Amino acid sequence: MNNLIVSYDPSQYRFHDWASRVLGVACLGVAHESSEVKKLNRSPTINQLASSFSDILETYKLFVLNVVAKEFEGISTYQCPPSFRFHYCGSGSSVFHRDRDFGVEDGRINVWVPLTQVWGDNSLWIESEIGSNDYTPLSLDLGQALIFDGVNLGHGSKINTTASTRVSFDFRFQPGPGPAKRSSY
C-alpha cells in the first residue's frame, strides 16, 4: 500500500482540545515547558492521555469507523486504546525500525495522528519504499493523519531540534470484513 494522508475535521474529532485539557496546557506545541507534563508522560501507554482515554473512546471509535475505514473495504480489528507519544522539543529520538522487527504481523496497517503541526525534526521520518532507507520527514497540519505500512516501511523520529513539541497518537488495524472489533495489539 502507498502512504495515504487523510484529512478529518478537528472540530468533530476533538483530540487536540481533549489533549490540551488533560495536559493542562493551552498549546500542545509548548508542552515541553511544563515540568509536570514531562514528568508524567514518558511512555506511549502509561501517560496522562492514556489514563484519560475513556473520555474520548467514542470519538476515537467514530474516527476509526468514519475516517479510516472509508479508505478500505472494511476493518476487522483495530487497536484500542491507541499509543500516545510525546516528542519533546530539544530531546528524544526513536530507533528507526519496521514494526515487523518487533513481531507485528504482516497485513496490519498503521495510522499516525499528530495533534500538533509537524515538520522536520519534530515529525515522523519514513522511507519512501521498503528497504530504501531514504528517510524523509512528513509535514502535516492539525486535521491530517497518515495511513501507512509500518510493518514493512522503516520509520522513526530524530532528536527534535525544532521549537515545537509533537504530541501524537498511533494505532494499527487489520483490514477485512467487519464489524470492526477492538483489540489490544
Image: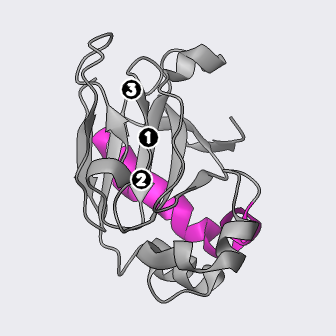
Of residues 148 and 22, the one nearer the viewer is: 22
Q: Which amino acid does label 3 sit on?
A: Asp
Residue sitting at x 39%, y 26%: 149
Scheme of colours in the image: one colour
Cα gap from disc 3 to disc 1, whole angstroms:
16 Å
In x, y percent, where is residue 163? 36, 68
Question: Is disc 3 surrounded by few (<14), some (14 to 19) or many (20+) residues within 10 Å?
Answer: many
Quarter of the image with the C terminus in it: top right
Label 3 or label 1, whichever lies nearer to me, is: 1
Residue that carries the numbered disc 2 in the rendered image:
160
Look at the image and give the residue range highlighted in magenta.
47-72
Q: What residue type is labelled 2?
A: Asn
Q: Is residue 68 magenta?
A: yes
Task: Name the image quarter holding residue 119.
Answer: bottom left
Residue sitting at x 45%, y 65%: 165
Cα gap from disc 2 to disc 3, whole angstroms:
24 Å
Residue that carries the numbered disc 3 in the rendered image:
149
In x, y percent, where is residue 133? 30, 17
